[in-house]
Amino acid sequence: MKQKKVVFGDSEIVEFCLTTLDTNEIHDPAYMAKLGKRVIVPGLFVLSQTASLSVDFLKNHACSLKVLFNSLLSSGDVVTLRSSSSKGNPSEVRLSAINRTDTMTLKDDYTRLSVKETRFKSDHQGILRRLEVTKEQIEKFKRLIGTEDKDVANFLFAVSYASHASLMSIEKPETEIEIEIKETISKDPGISPFYHSIEIHIPSPFPVFNPVGELDYFIHFEREKPFKVYGVYVRCEHHGYLVFNAYYNLLGIDCGLILRMAKAIKENSAE
């Protein structure tokens, strides 16, 4: 088992969001301070730091990464990030981020790297969303997640950057479902898109690439529950080379609920 204790501070949260182009106000210290709340830590920031504890398994064994987001972490929280072999199953590594509870679990399920391959539908092409990537973004991301392995940092950056590509599809919709999601958010500004879970297929051999320049994301939305729950298929490529396939489960969450879950500025953090 590998673990480390971290405290996510406002400045590094802001830097992570600038690096991955996450513009959600819940990560903005000035906005949250007006509400008497601490900044919410991006889930993909937590995931990237935790996955970095399992560099060898991720690069040399894992075929899939399943991510669950159960609860929120706020800036100032003391969090134990942990990577551990699943009991009785050496083909899995469990990833945990523990404050009061493990924030990456859901009922009896948990976030994990696995040698079991995840299969995705192949009957959709997806709409291309091409994103520019700078050397500065990659260098900052690597430093923020605390890994010396550039290949793992590049892969986790591509996973984190996919969120911006998906939101681009909502902001500039082309399909009926994308238009539906944008109209839902426009009609009710109190609703915010929130990732509930992610399933990622990791190619073999592990993708080794330099993302500086651009990354291509092919985005395909599916409707699970109209105006509430959607699935997002994402294929990430670099110059035609597959980086990963993923399925993101997207929920429409009441912003008021998210803010109620955020800890107050005067509230003490707990391990």
Image: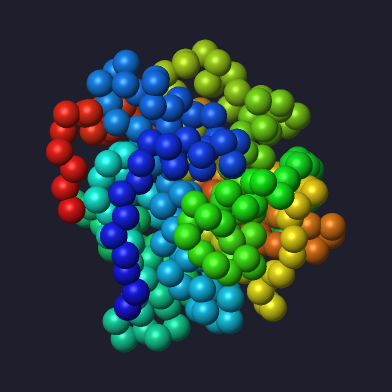
Query: Residue at 54% of width from left, 29% of height from top?
Result: 23
Specify whether residue 58 is in view. yes
User: Is the N terminus in the top left, top right, bottom left or bottom right quadrant?
Assistant: bottom left
Image position, residue 141 (x, y; %):
57, 51
**Residue 266 x, y percent position in the rendering:** 17, 29
Is 239 rendered above or below residue 151? Answer: above
Where is 110 relative to 126, above or below?
Answer: below
Depth check, front residue: 105 or 210:
210
Q: Nearer the viewer, residue 131 or 86?
A: 131
Q: How are the residues colored?
A: rainbow
Left or right, 112 with respect to 121, comes to left
**Viewer can see residue 201:** no
Q: What is the x, y in percent for residue 163?
A: 58, 42
Residue 129 locus on image (x, y percent): 76, 40
Residue at 74%, 65% (x, y): give it. 209
* Residue sitting at x 64%, y 52%: 138
Q: Is residue 249 above or below residue 121?
A: above
Q: Is residue 192 left or right of residue 152?
A: left
Count of numbered circles in the view: 0
Q: Is residue 67 left or right of residue 35?
A: right
Q: Residue furthest top?
A: 187
Residue sitting at x 54%, y 21%: 184
